[in-house]
Image: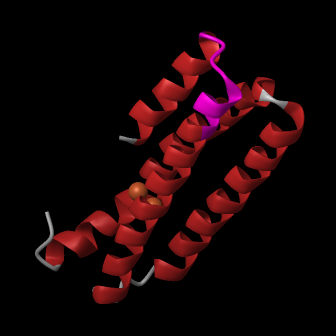
């Protein structure tokens, strides 16, 4: 889901779509990310996940980073979004392998597969 939103952002950028179009996808990206983080964090609390605090910090840092990019986009325009896409791709790979991977055992133990 996340990657497909990133991909559509890349596609509109390539096609030189209007700022409004791009802005909509950015909003979609932010709301999906918030939804996804909130879901993970709800289970952290429910299952008393031991690494919850450091994981939530990762999520919050990402939200702040994306806010910064959004401000830069409003000031500098679509060019900066290539940086955003690169940043998010790297973040996503690292976050999945370093952080999301760690809660799988805890979630499974609590009956979530
Ligand atoms: Fe995740
Ligand atoms: Fe996460």
Quadrant containing the C terminus in the rendered view: bottom left
Q: Residue at x 62, y 68 (%)?
A: 60
Q: Nearer the viewer, residue 113 or 4?
A: 4
Residue 93: percent from left, percent from top? 49, 41
Quadrant containing the N terminus in the rendered view: top left
Question: Is residue 14 placed above or below 46 in the rendered structure?
Answer: above
- Please state if 77 lies on the left or on the right of 41 as rendered: right
Q: Residue at x 68, y 51 (%)?
A: 66
Q: What range of the chain is rendered magenta? A: 15-23
Question: Is residue 105 placed above or below 85 in the rendered structure?
Answer: below
Question: Is residue 10 placed above or below 83 in the rendered structure?
Answer: above
> For residue 18: magenta?
yes
> For residue 46: magenta?
no
Model colouring: secondary structure
Q: Quadrant of ligand 2?
A: bottom left
Q: Where on the picture, by quarter, is residue 15?
A: top right
Residue 40: percent from left, percent from top? 37, 69
Q: Residue at x 81, y 41 (%)?
A: 74
Outermost residue, top direction? 15
Q: Nearer the viewer, residue 76 or 95?
A: 76
């Amino acid at each position: 889901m996340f990657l497909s939103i990133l991909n559509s952002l890349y596609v509109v950028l390539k096609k030189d779509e209007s700022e409004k179009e791009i802005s909509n996808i950015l909003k979609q990206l932010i709301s999906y990310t918030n939804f996804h983080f909130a879901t993970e964090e709800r289970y952290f609390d429910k299952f008393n996940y031991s690494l919850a605090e450091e994981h939530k910090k990762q999520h919050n840092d990402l939200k702040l980073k994306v806010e910064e990019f959004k401000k830069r986009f409003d000031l500098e325009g679509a060019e900066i979004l290539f940086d955003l896409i690169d940043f998010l791709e790297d973040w996503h790979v690292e976050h999945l392998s370093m952080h999301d991977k760690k809660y799988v055992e805890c979630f499974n133990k609590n009956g979530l597969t």
